[in-house]
Amino acid sequence: MAFFNRKINSDLWFQLAFHLVLWSLWIAWPFIHAHDNERYTRFASYLIPLTMAHIPLFLINTELLIPKVFRRKGVGAYLLSLLGLIVLFAAFQYLIRGSYIPEEFRRHRTSIFWAVVPVLFATAMSTGYGLIIYLSKQEKAKQEEQAERLKSELSFLRSQISPHFIFNVLNSIVYLIRSKSSLAEPVTIKLSELMRYTLYNSGSESVPLEKEVNYLRNYIELQKIRFEEDVDIQLHISGRASAQQIEPMLLIPFVENAFKHGVGLIKEPVIAVQLAIKEDRINFSIRNKIGPESIENKDGSSGIGLKNVKRRLELLYPHMHDLRVTQDEEWFVVSLMLQFLPGAEAGLTVNTDSKNAASSANLMPSSL
């Protein structure tokens, strides 16, 4: 019962159609060849059981010898087994013809040629068909194995997101408790909302673009509360967030990295974020000021978020993104163009400007 309830894939449909067409033509060919010859038509009717006897030969070769003998024991064992199969079925055909076909068709009844040639022809077809199916299955299995490896790698990369983010969040909470206790409670509540999004969505295959954009905006707003006027934080989000889906937590590692290395002892720190949402893609840019201490004081965990997101982009958006990371003595700049699959419809309008948005409009690198 389970077999009938199973979804039949395209490969199985192809095989069923192939066998239906092949054996229909195989059985009908003697009748087609007979035309209006009544005697040959009667002879063709006697050939039906003999013709159908080639079906088990075909199946034994394609379903047993090729996948079992050829794959496990090699070409030599397969050819020897195939030779034995040919001899067995040719002998069967010859004996059946001698006892089953009437005397009036004696020439066809006693001819070894007519017993052996159809068997050889059926064997040749089954070998060609079986090898094609076998190689196709091998290639498909290889692709599935590779897909599983990539899926496992992606799952591991996603599992790194939450601990990495939570670690940064805890640092923020500790800082607020020590220096700005009046803000600690409301900020902790807001942080808990961000963490809830992280915990419940970081393992998902995709989330609506609108949610990811709101998450990015809320994260930066919290950083504004934390740093107040100490850091010039610029945010500009423009365009229309539609029903498009995006890998969760894809942009935030770049922002985390900017806040990790773009504040502190840096003179007049600036972190500028720009996100332009278009119908078929998003253009994202973030740049932050850096100083010598930003490079010298990197700990062992530095760069984990960036490496993570780079690998996820390679796995999920091959040939659909352009990531550029540049650095000079003063600025660290990340620019990302991410293309969506076509067909998404426009939805909610998102247009958020922070202070200094007008000046931040010129921060998008020309490559985007």
Image (spheres, rainbow, N blue to C red):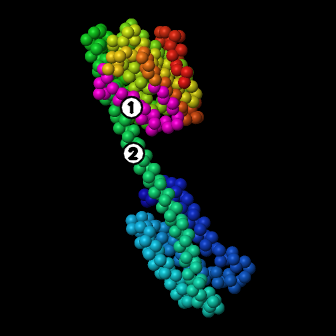
Q: Which of the two discs, 1 and 2, sits closer to the camera? A: 1
Question: Is residue 239 or residue 61 the one in the foreground?
Answer: 61
Relative height, residue 179 to residue 314 (above, below): above
Residue 187 within the segment the image draws in magenta: no
Marks 1 and 2, Cα distance to the nearest angstrom?
Answer: 18 Å
**Residue 280 percent across, percent down from the top left:** 57, 30
Q: Position of residue 224 (x, y in %)?
A: 39, 12
Identify residue for label 2.
Answer: 149
**Depth order, front residue of 230/38:** 230
The vertical placement of 169 against 129, above or below, is: above
Residue 122 at x, y = what percent? 55, 73
Q: Which residues are magenta?
A: 297-325
Rendering quarter of residue 178? top left
Location of the C terminus by quadrant is: top right
* Residue at the extreme right: 36
Mark 2 lies on a secondary structure that is helix
Outermost residue to the left: 178
Q: Write the residue at 34% across / 33% down.
A: 160
List the residue tagged with mark 1.
307
